[in-house]
Amino acid sequence: MTGAVCPGSFDPVTVGHLDIITRAATQFDEVVVTVMINKSKRGLFTVDERIEMIAEATTQLKNVTIASWHGLLVDYAKQEGYTAIVKGLRSANDFDYELPMAQMNQKLTGVDTLFLTADPAYSFLSSSLVKEVATFGGDVKDMVPASVHARLLARIAERKAE
Ligand code: ADP
């Protein structure tokens, strides 16, 4: 039985994330998408909302589950018996950022990080850019699942009214 953790902030999940999750699900028997909790950062969506949106977008992937974790990701991977972390690489910037973390995690626990190259159609895509563009009225419909798009517009309108 092979299992991998697919971590991120997923605030909110995009079609780029879903591409990586879907491809990871073909390589491993089990994939757990793990929403990493950062208490010092106010997200646009709560962790529970992020989990709900990922769940809605991955119902067809029967070997994918969703969890959240606060702390060292490798502690979670070890605790749950997962031997690999899967991450998407969009650019050399992602690589430079990810490499020391991957090496540190390997050193700490022996858990390896496997990188999947982003689909070039999505390599410009990040949750933060989607939020920024949507805030200024740009069309991000094709960049997130439909249910996320509706929630995104509603949340941005709520925040503007605050
Ligand atoms: P972001 O806020 O940058 O969208 P996250 O922290 O939620 O990203 O990212 C979680 C993981 O998903 C990271 O490994 C990241 O490189 C990957 N990822 C994010 N967006 C994409 C994309 N468009 N294509 C491939 N991988 C992606």
Image (cartoon, rainbow, N blue to C red):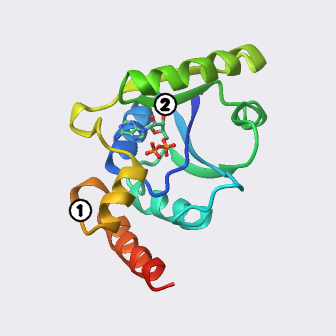
**Residue position marked by numbered label 1 in the rendering:** 141
**Residue position marked by numbered label 2 in the rendering:** 87
Query: Furthest residue to the bottom?
Result: 161
Residue 118 in the image: x percent, y percent?
33, 31
> CB under 8 Å between callouts 1 and 2?
no
> With 150 as the anchor, is 114 left or right in this view?
right
* Residue 2 seen: no
Secondary structure of the residue carrying numbered label 2: strand
> With 120 as the anchor, is 44 left or right in this view?
right
Residue 114 in the image: x percent, y percent?
51, 21
**Looking at mark 2, is its residue's CB closer than 8 Å to ligand 1?**
yes
Secondary structure of the residue carrying numbered label 1: helix
Mark 1 Cα-neighbour bin, 10 Å: few <14, some 14–19, many ≥20 = some
Say which residue appears at 71% left-offset and 16% top-offset.
Answer: 110
Say which residue appears at 58% left-offset and 28% top-offset.
Answer: 85
Q: Quadrant of ligand 1?
A: top left
Label 1 vs label 2: CA separation? 24 Å
Q: Quadrant of residue 83?
A: top right
| For residue 131, above or below residue 123 | below
**77 and 41: which is toward the camera:** 41
Amino acid identity at mark 1:
Lys
